[in-house]
Image (tube, rainbow, N blue to C red):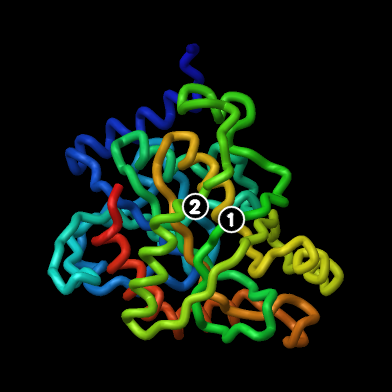
Amino acid sequence: MRITKYKDNVQQSVEYLKKWHGSAPEIAIVLGSGLSDAIPKIQEMKSVRFEEIPGFKTSTVQGHSGDLRIGSVTAYLTSGKEKTREIAFLRGRNHAYEGNDPGEVVHNLRSLITWGVKGIILTNAAGCLNTEWELGKMMILTDHINATGLSPLNGDYGLGFGAQFVDMSEGYDKKWQSQIKEIAHLSNHTIYDGVYYGVLGAHYETPAEIRMFKTLGASAVGMSTVLETIAARQLGAKVAALSCLTNYGAGLKQAQLSHTEVMDMGKRFASDMANIVLKAAVSLEV
């Protein structure tokens, strides 16, 4: 198979990461809007800015710090035993609405998996489509609808990383879903599950669009995650994803939506999500 310029750029990122840290951690977490500072002691972890890594691109969106951090995290498992695991944290992500092509959106994550990361936990801030659900709570993704019109597997972006026609019948690992729900319940945190509707953005949706999404079976809507999941599954990594439900969709309850309000809500409940995500990251089998 021919080596594309895109594949070569990913490999350059991988070579840098090997020199910077050696072997890859088993698990990586992508920290979405408002979550970058929610991980305890994350500021003390080994770090490198995205712009220092060949091929990496820094997000332009408020709330996305733009660095890779690696550190050991200790947590108590559901069995009561204590376990420590090294975790990689991508503090921020790239979005298609920033003008990035699909390859740039998933480049950072794809590089980590090519480096050796075996499991990915994606987090995001999302609009809630179920008015019976409480804002500030988490939804674990059971599936998604990709309405971006994009794929990280098209053209050169998909060559050299696995099958171009990837089976997405189980994009989100079912065993991981069950384990995360158990962790949440034992920690006395409410957690919902449902389908994530991935849109391009950057504008928020109209009330008519929200009604359509609900009709199609979606429970939350957001502007990230789906392309990352597709790229991760192509490379064979396990995936789990959690949304922090920061607002109701347009026309459901709130008069207007703003990114500032989404950020504020995410920060208010970030510690709850961090608690669940860290326990999951330490305990999940890859």
Report the front residue among 168 and 147. 168
Which element carries disc 1, helix, strand or loop? strand
Name the residue type under label 2: Tyr
Q: Is residue 267 above or below residue 172?
A: below
Q: Are marks 2 and 1 in contact (CB under 8 Å)?
A: yes
Amino acid at the residue labelled 1: Asp
Q: Residue at x 35, y 42 (%)?
A: 112
Q: Residue beneath label 2, please?
A: 172
Count of numbered badges drawn on the protein: 2
x, y percent for residue 24: 24, 42
Q: Look at 62% across and 55% down and name the residue there.
A: 144
Does residue 241 appear to the left or right of 278 in the view shown?
right
Q: Position of residue 235 (x, y in %)?
A: 43, 34
Q: Position of residue 109 (x, y in %)?
A: 42, 45
**Quadrant of the rendered structure where residue 272 is?**
bottom left
Label 2 neighbour load within 10 Å: few <14, some 14-19, many 20+: many
Disc ID at residue 223? none
Is residue 281 shown above or below 274? above
The residue singled out by tag 1 in the image is 143
Camera-side residue of 1 and 8: 1
Residue 146 seen in this snapshot = yes
For image coordinates 46% across by 82% down, the residue present is 190
Left or right: 92 as drawn, with respect to 105: left
Residue 66: in sight, yes or no? Answer: no
Sort mark 1 into few (<14), some (14-19) or many (20+) by Cα contacts within 10 Å.
Answer: many
